[in-house]
Amino acid sequence: MKTLEFPMQVKALKDAGHFEGYASVFDNVDEGMDVMEKGAFKEFAHTRDGKVLVLYQHSMRDPIGKADVSQDDKGLHFDAQLVMGDATAQKAYEHMKAGTIDGMSIGFDILPGGAEFTNAGVRRISAAKLWEISVVTFGMNPLARIEAVKAARMSTIREFEDWLRDAGGFTNAQAKLLASGGWKALQGARDESQANDAIKQLTERFIAQPFPV
């Protein structure tokens, strides 16, 4: 399996663990002298629900989510959701928000007869099978990027409880206890930064206490 890497740009939006963008841009030569032609992805390795795996640093041991992928005139668009209860996915998400991980990559095979070299030494890929997309540290293609990473923004206490379970890994009882004690502080936050600080402070305060299981 071969790989191609791309940089990402992060913008905070609303749902924890959701991000989207382009994993490949067509007709653009990357720094490795490869170019994907329009519609180059002929086959896809799908999960049982028809999505493509998202990995961390191309590690088969570290699946961190799934994505819907589609080809348009620009490239291979993806709309992905991380498994926020997974520690590696949470780490990747935090680094994406901070901008310390700034690359996307695709894992693919070239199908028979699916590539040729030009006189300038550029490999033009016209037929490929996509295996996965990955969050990686470095990128090579300046045009392909993550365009949106959605951060947590809750409007009800029930959504706060759900977020604590899904993103924080707390049990139902722990999430209810945290939510009941911290919803007023979260509601009083004026912006997303204050909301995140409030969640962090509440979590640190409550995690030091014995929790029901």
Image (cartoon, rainbow, N blue to C red):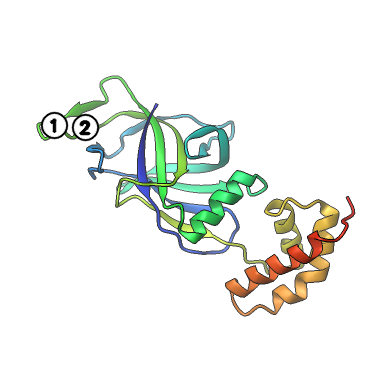
Label at residue 164: none
Rate crowding at label 2 as few (under 14), some (14 to 19) or many (20 or more) other CA atoms within 10 Å: some
Residue type at mark 1 is Thr
Query: Horizontal and vertical percent for residue 38?
Result: 27, 40
Task: Residue at the far front: name it.
Answer: 208
Q: Residue at x 70, y 51 (%)?
A: 166
Quarter of the rendering containing residue 61? top right
The N terminus appears in which quarter of the rendering?
top left
Quarter of the rendering containing residue 182? bottom right
Quarter of the rendering containing residue 108? top left
Query: Horizontal and vertical percent for residue 207?
Result: 79, 59
Q: Is residue 130 above or below residue 138?
A: above
Secondary structure under badge 2? strand
Task: Residue at the far top: name it.
Answer: 112
Horizontal side, residue 3 vs residue 48: left or right: left
Q: Is residue 94 above or below residue 104?
A: below
Q: Residue at x 85, y 61 (%)?
A: 209
Kindly report the distance in space between the C-alpha atoms of the residues bearing marks 2 and 1.
Answer: 6 Å
Query: Horizontal and vertical percent for residue 131?
Result: 45, 31
Earlier in the chain: of badge 2 and badge 1, it is: 1
* Count of numbered labels shown in the rendering: 2
Residue type at mark 2 is Arg
Q: Residue at x 59, y 59 (%)?
A: 15
Rate crowding at label 1 as few (under 14), some (14 to 19) or many (20 or more) other CA atoms within 10 Å: few
Q: Residue at x 81, y 61 (%)?
A: 208
Query: Mark 2 highlights which residue?
Result: 123
Asked if the residues shown at circle 2 and circle 1 are in contact, with their CB atoms under 8 angstroms apart, the answer is: yes
Secondary structure under badge 1? loop
Label at residue 118: 1
